[in-house]
Image (tube, rainbow, N blue to C red):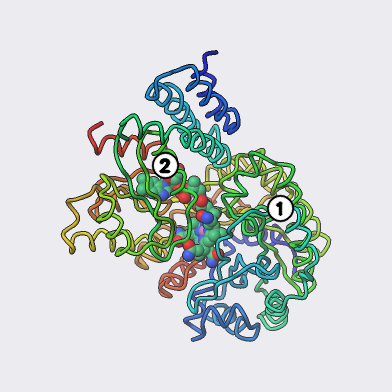
Amino acid sequence: MSVLENLKENVIAGNESKVLEYTQKALDEGIDLEKILNDGFIPGMDVVGSKFQANEIYVPEMLISAKAMKAGMKILEPLLTEAGIEPIGKVVIGTVKGDLHDIGKNLVAMMLEGGGFEVIDAGVDITAQKFMDLVKENKPDILGLSALLTTTMVEIKNVIDAFKEEGLRDDVKIIVGGAPVSEDYAKDIGADGYSPDAASAVNLAKKLLGK
Amino acid sequence: MGRLLDLVKSSYSEKRRIVAPLVGFPGVKIAQSSIKLAQQNHEEHFKVVSSLVDKFKPDIQFVLMDLSVEANALGLNTLFPPDDSATVMKKHGKFGTDELALLEKIKFDSDSRLLSYVKTVELMKRRFPAGVKVGAYVTGPYTLAGLIIGAEEAGLMAARHPEKLEEICVFTNDCIMRYAELLLSAGADAVCVLEPSGVMLGPSHFEKFSVANVKDIVKLCHTADSDCIYHVCGNSTHLIEKMVESGVDGLSLDSKDGGIYLSEIAKNIQKNIVLIGNISPSRTIVYGSPKEVKEEVKALLESMDSFPNYVLSTGCDLPLETPVDNISAFMETGRNYTISV
Ligand code: B12
């Protein structure tokens, strides 16, 4: 197997130390940074995403893959910046006010990173005001909002309304998700997109940016 | 009072269904109390659950659902909002064997809040009208492990260091068993094991961290001639076979919105396992109208007509803001229904 195939397989297996080893090896062999991303990390996470959707793997396996990828990306990130290679887009993501659930949001964030996005993770229990501040400060292409409680799902709408009131709504695409959220609800409240899981969130984000 | 399956079968022979929604918090409004008070004081807690029994006359009444009882008794930081259930705060930092050794020293079963749940069960058993079964909850071993070390950390540990997580789950189950023993001595007719975090696991992990331990809780319940029920939230279709392997008497399953098609499951499950569910708590009972509640309950009951082993219930616990009229609509439809086979 080539270095990049090994890298991909170990991302799928969630083997962090091997991912670090093969990332370094790929760099030592002088493989192009973008090629490492596009032929190692991204196809690896694609497989992980489809296996998750097909119920072949579950949250623990997806978490270790995402963590392994994130560790490898840490090596690449400074080099990518140095080489002037831009991420395909910038995303701010967080869980809305009153809600402390973050596993799903973290998976979405990590999959987006694996998909080539720069991600700013706002954390949990985030107010509309804080989301607006983060958007003003970071100028992301996309804002991701997560809610896991039926009682906090309404907070997603409040955030979108606040963006409208402040005249910020057209500055950013807003995508939403979390167990109680649905496609219909997303449409009703004026979000730009919804996805049921982390793998399709990446496709959604790319589609919204026309990539 | 007799076991759940017998009760379910005998009412089926009379063409009636046992009706037992998972309802607790709405009683706080009826009794003009607060969740915080009720979760900390047994008299107040009893006042809340008995207001539900007076108003709705269910066949089984559970205590308030509270996933923080055991975790709180183990000393974990817990929030007590006045009108929301107590919640364990997010865990920061690493959890290792040193911490486990510390937790093992805690005199878990003399915690006053945990004992207030035991006393509530005692009062329910003593003062409820004959014919109302008393239900208690315990947190599942994997979910409790997740509350202690962090839910994400538990997921990671399941994949990376399963043997470590097994050790933690044996410890959590030991605590849960001690609590369950107290609840059973207080007179609980059924103990329901709440394992919401289990939904994140695949079948083999679920078996290792949850089922293997829950088997002991089931045995304990049976020794006391009580029933044991498994409850996992969300789409637990992939775990049903494993839950059954634990030997439990009943499965309490989430709603169709959560991905559970009860009549399909009923076709494939042994007839000695009671299925409990599964009207959508949020879409139907919180946000629907009484008319919608009636229609959904009727449709669900009809779809279950050919299965004796069934109890009409909600897919999950009803929140405080549930309209009381919708709970009444649920109860009435269930009570007035006649099985047509
Ligand atoms: C783990 C868990 C917890 C943990 C959270 C730990 C953590 N750090 O996140 C703890 C124990 C702290 C917890 C607390 C509570 N919880 Co909780 N919890 C869960 C549980 C078991 C799993 C959630 C989860 O992580 N799933 C796995 C991830 C991978 O899935 P996901 O979150 O759905 O995310 C995926 C998609 O939705 C999507 N997605 C998610 N976000 C986003 C965002 C965007 C932009 C996009 C595009 C996609 C997307 O992609 C993700 C990956 O594929 C669920 C049960 C369930 N079956 O869902 C209950 C559940 C969500 N909790 C519930 C409740 C009631 C509570 C509490 C109120 C209970 C309590 N009193 O203890 C508190 C509330 C605390 C608070 N204020 O937030 C209820 C909610 C009921 C409702 N419908 O309102 C549930 C459904 C369980 C239940 N039925 O009782 N909980």
Residue A72: image location, x then y, percent? 50, 33
Residue closest to the eye, A204 or A44: A44
Q: Chain of mark 1?
A: B
Q: Which residue is mark 1?
A: B96
At label 2, the amino acid type is: Asp
User: Would you call the spot at circle 2 few (<14 residues within 10 Å), some (14-19), or many (20 or more)?
Assistant: some
Q: Amino acid at mark 1?
A: Gly
Label 2 belongs to which residue?
Answer: A197
Disc 2 is placed on an element classified as loop
Residue at position x 65%, y 82% in the image: B42
State the SS at label 1: loop
Chain under label 2? A
Image position of A206 with respect to B253: above or below: above
**Where on the picture, by quarter, is residue B91?**
bottom right
Q: Quadrant of residue A79?
A: top left
Q: Position of residue A156 (x, y in %)?
A: 32, 59
Disc 2 under 8 Å from ligand 1? The reply is yes
